Image (cartoon, helix red, strand yellow):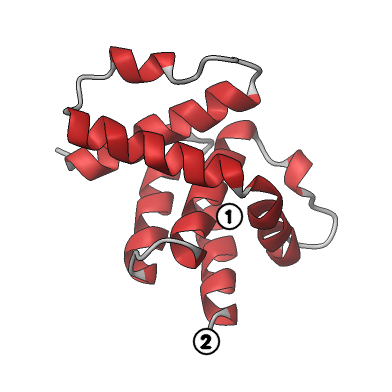
Amino acid sequence: MSSARHQARILAIQLLYSSEMGNDRPHALIGESRLSKKYTDFAAELFSAVSSNVAELDAKIAETLNEGWTIERLGAVERAILRLGVHELLLASVDSAIAINEAVELSKEMADENAPPLINGVLESIRKSLR
């Protein structure tokens, strides 16, 4: 069973995905959540923080992608997971191992089977660049 914080991160990914797909009211998903207010607030904070820094996060992701790949070429779920992971690595006070592990676990649950190695590779590259 996954933790409430993990479930909140799933909700944050759903909010990011919904917003990217053109939903002008992604916060409506919060009302449908079974998480406590503490964790829906955490998800909303993550969504807001990532949404406010998309250009910076995407630039950092783009720096680490293999030649021939662009941020636009990634799937929307993968973009959302990477944006959240990079946010937690760069802007939040989350231990880098936890941020990377959470992002990889999210990709296993929510994305294509090829996503976990990609997510891990990008976030590890960013983590190493922070040293």
Q: What is the quadrant of residue 73 in the picture?
A: top right
- In the image, taking residue 82 as reference, residue 1 lies left or right, namely left
Vertical placement of 50 versus 39: above or below?
Answer: below
Q: Secondary structure beneath disc 1?
A: helix
Give the residue at mark 1.
118
Question: Residue 97 at x, y = what percent?
Answer: 35, 69
Name the side, left or right, on which 123 lies relative to 98: right
Q: Residue at x 20, y 20 (%)?
A: 34
For label 2, count other residues whose C-alpha is less than 10 Å away and answer few (under 14), some (14-19) or many (20+).
few
Q: Residue furthest right?
A: 68
The residue depicted at 79 percent of the width and 52 percent of the height is: 69
Numbered-mark total: 2
Query: Circle 2 sits in a helix, a strand or a loop, which is it?
Result: loop
Residue 65 visible to the viewer: yes
Numbered mark located on residue 131 in the image:
2
The amino acid type of the residue labelled 1 equals Leu
